[in-house]
Amino acid sequence: MNHVTVGDKAPSFALIDQNGDKVKLSNFKGQRVILYFYPAAMTPGCTKQACDFTDNLNTFKVSGYVIVGISPDPPEKLRQFTELESIGFTLLSDPTKETMSAYGAFGEKKLYGKTVTGVIRSTFVINEKGVIEHAFRNVKATGHVAKMMRELALASSQ
């Protein structure tokens, strides 16, 4: 499994968003990006995490960050998720899990004591030059956004 680390150039991608539009990492050149990978839209943990990002969206924006979430869900499900939960940022569909694999966010993980293959909940902070500044791997859905904000020295807007 690939493991991008701090200091690596972020792997490029071109994926479809919740509106059916193609989004590339290069679209965000010159911006700081928080790229997070999650297993499935409309599940309790993933909903909590997405809502935590949405609740703090203004703090991230004011601090110069763009948030992008990636899951294997189809664009239609992502659109439903954004509408249902009022998600205020871009969600991308990675059905082949190619992008997830490039970031080391798909592979073997422990789930209820068993080793399974799946999405490894992970978040990467990418700087304006496309270089990974932070890598948070195998994170918990609950509390991750607050912990990450502390790490990035951002004050919560809640």
Image (spheres, helix red, strand yellow):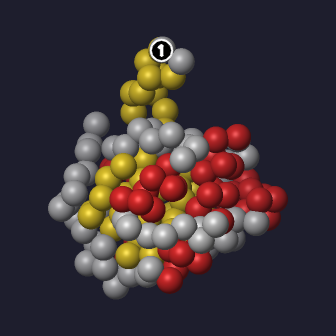
Residue 73 coordinates in the image, percent (x, y): 63, 49
Work out whether residue 95 can be spotted. no
Q: Can you identify the residue that label 1 sits on? A: 114
Extreme right residue here?
84
Work out whether residue 155 can be spotted. yes
State the quadrant of the N terminus. top left
Compared across the picture, whether 80 is left or right of 55 comes to right
Residue 39 picture quarter: top right
Is residue 141 or residue 114 the one in the foreground? 141
Is residue 121 or residue 107 the one in the foreground? 121
Compared across the picture, whether 155 is left or right of 75 comes to left
State the quadrant of the C terminus. bottom right
Residue 82 coordinates in the image, percent (x, y): 73, 63
- Is 19 placed above or below 80 here? below
Residue 116 coordinates in the image, percent (x, y): 47, 22
Residue at coordinates 27% horizontally, 63% vertically from top-left?
132
Is residue 153 or residue 32 the one in the foreground? 153
Residue at coordinates 51% horizontally, 55% vertically from top-left?
145
Q: What amino acid type is highlighted by mark number 1?
A: Lys
Residue 91 picture quarter: bottom right
Extreme left residue here?
7
Residue at coordinates 54% horizontally, 59% vertically from top-left?
69
Residue 45 picture quarter: top right
Residue 89 coordinates in the image, percent (x, y): 61, 70
Q: Residues within 10 Å of mark 1 (few under 14, many from 20)?
A: few
What is the total number of numbered labels drawn onto the structure image? 1
Q: Secondary structure at mark 1?
A: strand
Residue at coordinates 25% horizontally, 68% vertically from top-left?
131
Compared across the picture, whether 54 is left or right of 5 comes to right
